[in-house]
Image: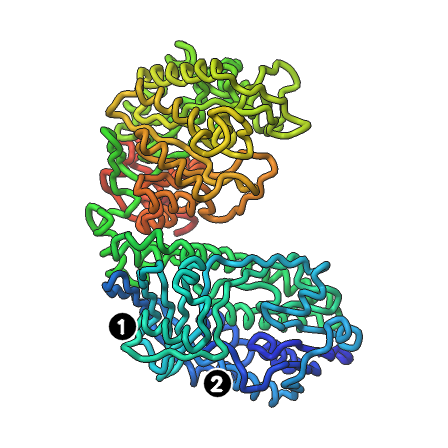
C-alpha cells in the first residue's frame, strides 16, 4: 500500500456485515472503529445460512475467518416439504448454517486480533458528524438504519411492506433437512420454515398472511404465547417439543431499495442499503458479500474514497437487484400460498422449490433427477425422454402437439395500407410454423378499417383480406402439418390512427387520420393523442356485428383457434379498466357493468365460431397504475369469460394507460397467469419475457401455466422450438423437423471442433 493511504474508518453497526467489513479493512492497514449499541452477546434471530459462493469469497479474502466458520458449520443437502401430511424430499441443494451468536463471536475475535476498536453498548454518533472526522463511514445499521433515514434526501429510499406476518423462533433439536410445512387451520393457511444451525438447535420461522394472523388472534399474543401456539400448530413437525424466542415479535417484512448507496464518504451496507425476503436466506449473505466488495473497491482506490464507493455500488448493484427480484417472487409466492394448497403434492413441492425462478426444471433435475422425473410423470409427460413443453394439450376439438405458442406480434406490414396480409406475412407466419411451435398466432387482426392501430395493420373485414389469410393458413397446414394457426381479433379503440411502430410508436398520423371511438372520451396520451368519441349503444351493436363477421371469415380461412383481444388498452380492454371506462350507463361503473360489452362481443363471436374450435381471450391482468385493474378484478374478468365459454385465458399486462410503471424482469407477467389458473382452474397462457425452454418447462411443471407464449425469441430465431427440442435431445412427435430441414436438426460444429 502506498505511504499515506491508510484511512480512518468508522463503522456504524456491529452485525455480521459491519464486523466483516471492519476486519477486511483492518487487514488492509486501515484504522477501524466500530460502534454497536447492543452488548457483544446480544443478537436477534438464531441461525445464519451462507451459500457456497459466499464462503468462497470469504476463503479468498480471509482464510482465518473461513477456517473458523468451517469448524462450526452444519451442512445438509435435502429440502423436506410437507403437504397435507405427505412428506416429499428433494436432495442436492447444499446448505451451510451456523448460529448467529457464534458467527458474531468469530468476527469479534477476528476484529480484535486485527486491532479494530469495538465499542459495545455505545450508540454511534450521527453519520454526518463521523464523516467530518473520518475518511470513510460504513453504515451497517440495519433495516431501520438511522443513517439512511437521516440522509433520505440523498439516498432516496423506498420501503415496501409485505402482506404476511412472521416470527423468528427456535427449537432445541436439529431438523434433518430444510423443512417447509403447511398447516391449514380454521383461520387460514400458516407455514413453517425451519433449518438446523447446530447439532442440537434449529431456526423456526412461522409465517402467515396478515388476515390469518389477525383471525387467529396472534396479534394479541406476547412472545411466550406466540411460541406456544406456533408449537401446538406444528406439533408433529416439532416432535411435540416447544419453541422459544429471543426478543421475538411478529413483524412484516420490509423490502428496502435505495437509489443511491453512498453520499460523500458515507456508504450504506447490508440491510441499510437493501433487503431481500428471508425465504431465500439472503440477509447475512448479502451483507457479507457487500463487505467483500467494499473492501476490494477500497483496496483498488484507497486515495479516492468517493471513487471506491462508486465502484463498490457498481459492482454490487446488479447482483443485489437480481437477488431482490428473486426474493420478491418468493415472498409473493408465500403471500399467495392459499391459492396453491389444492395442487397435487409433487406439483406443489416443485412449485415451492422453483418459486423464486432461481431454481428451474433443468437445475432441479441436475440436483435430484429422481424427484424431478416423478413430477414430470404426474404432469403427464408421455415418457422420460419427453420434456414438459412437448406434452400435448387438448382444447375442445384441437390438440396442440406442444405447449409453445408464438405470441401475437404486430408486424405493421399490411399491403398498401388496406389491411391485406401479403408475402411478408406468409413468410413470417410460415417460418414460425415450420419452426415447431404448437400454436402460431397472427398479430391483432382488425375487424374494421376504423379499428386498425396503424395503416400497416391487417384486417379481416373484406373478402380480399380473407383470401389472403386463407393462402397463409393453407401453407401452414400443408407445409407444417400439426401446427395450429390462431387468429387474434381486435379493435384499436382510442389507440388507433397512429404511425407504425418504427416511425413513432403511439404517435398520431400526420395526415389521413380516421375518427377514434372508445368506452369514454379520454385520449391515450393527453395532449398528444386524438380524443375518441364515446360509443353509443348503436355503435356497440355495429362493432359486435363487425367482430362476428370477422369470425365467420376467420372460420372460412381455416384458422384453428380464435383469440379475442381484450388487453393492452384497445377497445374491449378500455371497457374493462376503471382507468379508461368512465361511463355512467349500464356499461360503466362496477366491474359487472364494465364486463358487459366485452362479454357481448365474446358471445357474438362464440355463436358463429365453430363449436369444435377453441376460443381464448387475452386480458391485461394489471394496468401497472394506481386505481387500475386489481388482482381480484383480473380473476373475476377471467372467470366471467370462462363462464361464457372461453377455453383458455391469455394473461398479459399493461399498455392500458400511457403513464404505467411496469415491473419488468424475467417472466415478470407470469404471476398473473399463475394466480388466475390456481384460483379458477381454467387453462392459461403465460406471456412476458419467457426467454428459455427451461423457463417454459418450469412454469408448466409448477402449474403456473398450461401454455407459454414466446414472442421476441421467435423473432430472433424462427426455429426456437425446434432448437429447444434439439438442446434437450428430444426427437419425438411433438417437435418434428420438416423433411427438407432434417439435415439441420443437429447443431453444426464450431471452429476446429
Residue 402 position, x and y percent, is 29, 38
Please, is residue 36 above or below residue 90 in the view?
Answer: below
Q: Quadrant of residue 82?
A: bottom left
Question: Could you tell whether 685 is left or right of 377 in the image?
Answer: right
Please, is residue 421 above or below residue 356 in the view?
Answer: above
- Please name the residue that numbered disc 1 is placed on: 236
Would you call the spot at circle 2 few (<14 residues within 10 Å), some (14-19), or many (20 or more)? some
- Please name the residue that numbered disc 2 is placed on: 68
Q: Residue at x 22, y 56 (%)?
A: 374
Question: Of all residues shown, which one is farthest toward the top?
Answer: 463
Please, is residue 618 above or below residue 267 in the view?
Answer: above
Residue 162 position, x and y percent, is 50, 58
Q: Residue at x 29, y 72 (%)?
A: 237
Q: Secondary structure at mark 1?
A: loop
The label shown at residue 513 is none
Q: Quadrant of residue 462?
A: top left
Residue 161 position, x and y percent, is 53, 58
Q: Quadrant of residue 396?
A: top left
Pair 2/1: label in front? 1
Q: Secondary structure at mark 2?
A: helix
Question: Of all residues shown, which one is farthest toward the left?
Answer: 383
Q: Is residue 532 visible?
A: yes
**Distance between the alpha carbons at the discs numbered 2 and 1:** 35 Å
Q: Residue at x 32, y 73 (%)?
A: 232
Amino acid at each position: 500500500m502506498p505511504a499515506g493511504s491508510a484511512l480512518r474508518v468508522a463503522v456504524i453497526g456491529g452485525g455480521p456485515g459491519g464486523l466483516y467489513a471492519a476486519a477486511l479493512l483492518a487487514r488492509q492497514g486501515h484504522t477501524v472503529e466500530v460502534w454497536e449499541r447492543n452488548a457483544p452477546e446480544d443478537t436477534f434471530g438464531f441461525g445464519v445460512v451462507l451459500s457456497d459462493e459466499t464462503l468462497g469469497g470469504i476463503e479468498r479474502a480471509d482464510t482465518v475467518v473461513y477456517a473458523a466458520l468451517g469448524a462450526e458449520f452444519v451442512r445438509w443437502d435435502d429440502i423436506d416439504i410437507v403437504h397435507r401430511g405427505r412428506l416429499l424430499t428433494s436432495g442436492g441443494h447444499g446448505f451451510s448454517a451456523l448460529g448467529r451468536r457464534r458467527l458474531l463471536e468469530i468476527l469479534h475475535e477476528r476484529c480484535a486480533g486485527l486491532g479494530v476498536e469495538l465499542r459495545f453498548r455505545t450508540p454511534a454518533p450521527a453519520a454526518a458528524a463521523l464523516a467530518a472526522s473520518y475518511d470513510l463511514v460504513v453504515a451497517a445499521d440495519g433495516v431501520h438504519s438511522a443513517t439512511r433515514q437521516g440522509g433520505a434526501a440523498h439516498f432516496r429510499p423506498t420501503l415496501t411492506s409485505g402482506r404476511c406476518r412472521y416470527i423468528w423462533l427456535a427449537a432445541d433439536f436439529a431438523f434433518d433437512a430444510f423443512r417447509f410445512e403447511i398447516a391449514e387451520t380454521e383461520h387460514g393457511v400458516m407455514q413453517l420454515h425451519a433449518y438446523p444451525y447446530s447439532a442440537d438447535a434449529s431456526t423456526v420461522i412461522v409465517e402467515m398472511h396478515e388476515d390469518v394472523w389477525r383471525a387467529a388472534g396472534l396479534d394479541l399474543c406476547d412472545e411466550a404465547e406466540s411460541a406456544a401456539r406456533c408449537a401446538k400448530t406444528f406439533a408433529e413437525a416439532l416432535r411435540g417439543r416447544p419453541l422459544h424466542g429471543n426478543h421475538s415479535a411478529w413483524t412484516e417484512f420490509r423490502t428496502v431499495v435505495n437509489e443511491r448507496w453512498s453520499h460523500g464518504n458515507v456508504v450504506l451496507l447490508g440491510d441499510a442499503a437493501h433487503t431481500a425476503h428471508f425465504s431465500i436466506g439472503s440477509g447475512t449473505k448479502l451483507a457479507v458479500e457487500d463487505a467483500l466488495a467494499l473492501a476490494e473497491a477500497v483496496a483498488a482506490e484507497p486515495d479516492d474514497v468517493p471513487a471506491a464507493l462508486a465502484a463498490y455500488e457498481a459492482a454490487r448493484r446488479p447482483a443485489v437487484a437480481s437477488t431482490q427480484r428473486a426474493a420478491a417472487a418468493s415472498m409473493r409466492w408465500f403471500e399467495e400460498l392459499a391459492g396453491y394448497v389444492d395442487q397435487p403434492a409433487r406439483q406443489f413441492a416443485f412449485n415451492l422449490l422453483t418459486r423464486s425462478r432461481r431454481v428451474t426444471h433443468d437445475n432441479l433435475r441436475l440436483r435430484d433427477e429422481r424427484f424431478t422425473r416423478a413430477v414430470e410423470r404426474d404432469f403427464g409427460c408421455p415418457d422420460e425422454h419427453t420434456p414438459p413443453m412437448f406434452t400435448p394439450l387438448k382444447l375442445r376439438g384441437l390438440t396442440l402437439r406442444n405447449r409453445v405458442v408464438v405470441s401475437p406480434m404486430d408486424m405493421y406490414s399490411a399491403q398498401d395500407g388496406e389491411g391485406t396480409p401479403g408475402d411478408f406475412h406468409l413468410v413470417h407466419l410460415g417460418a414460425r410454423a415450420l419452426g415447431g411451435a404448437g400454436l402460431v398466432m397472427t398479430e391483432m387482426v382488425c375487424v374494421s378499417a376504423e379499428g386498425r392501430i396503424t395503416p400497416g395493420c391487417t384486417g379481416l373485414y373484406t373478402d380480399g383480406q380473407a383470401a389472403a389469410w386463407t393462402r397463409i393458413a393453407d401453407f401452414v397446414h400443408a407445409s407444417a402439418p400439426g401446427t395450429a394457426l390462431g387468429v387474434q381479433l381486435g379493435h384499436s379503440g382510442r389507440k388507433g390512427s397512429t404511425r407504425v411502430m418504427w416511425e413513432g410508436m403511439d404517435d398520431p398520423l400526420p395526415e389521413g387520420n380516421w375518427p377514434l371511438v372508445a368506452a369514454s372520451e379520454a385520449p391515450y396520451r393527453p395532449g398528444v393523442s386524438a380524443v375518441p368519441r364515446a360509443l353509443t349503444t348503436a355503435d356497440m351493436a355495429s362493432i359486435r356485428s363487425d367482430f362476428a363477421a370477422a369470425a365467420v371469415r376467420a372460420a372460412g380461412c381455416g384458422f384453428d383457434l380464435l383469440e379475442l383481444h381484450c388487453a393492452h388498452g384497445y377497445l374491449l380492454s378500455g371497457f374493462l379498466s376503471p382507468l379508461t371506462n368512465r361511463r355512467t350507463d349500464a356499461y360503466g361503473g362496477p366491474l359487472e357493468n364494465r364486463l358487459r360489452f366485452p362479454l357481448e362481443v365474446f358471445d357474438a363471436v362464440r355463436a358463429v365460431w365453430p363449436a369444435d374450435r377453441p376460443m381464448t381471450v387475452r386480458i391485461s391482468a394489471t394496468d401497472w397504475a394506481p386505481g387500475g385493474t386489481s388482482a381480484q378484478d383480473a380473476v373475476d374478468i377471467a372467470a366471467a369469460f370462462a363462464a361464457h365459454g372461453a377455453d383458455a385465458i391469455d394473461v398479459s399486462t399493461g399498455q392500458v394507460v400511457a403513464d404505467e410503471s411496469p415491473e419488468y424482469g424475467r417472466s415478470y407477467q407470469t404471476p398473473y397467469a399463475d394466480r388466475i389458473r390456481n384460483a379458477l382452474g381454467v387453462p392459461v397462457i403465460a406471456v412476458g419475457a419467457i426467454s428459455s425452454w427451461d423457463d417454459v418447462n418450469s412454469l408448466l411443471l409448477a402449474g403456473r401455466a398450461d401454455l407459454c407464449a414466446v414472442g421476441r425469441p421467435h423473432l430472433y430465431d424462427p426455429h426456437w422450438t425446434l432448437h429447444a427440442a434439439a438442446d434437450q435431445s428430444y426427437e419425438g412427435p411433438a417437435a418434428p423437423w420438416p423433411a427438407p430441414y432434417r439435415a439441420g436438426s443437429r447443431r453444426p460444429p464450431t471452429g476446429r471442433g
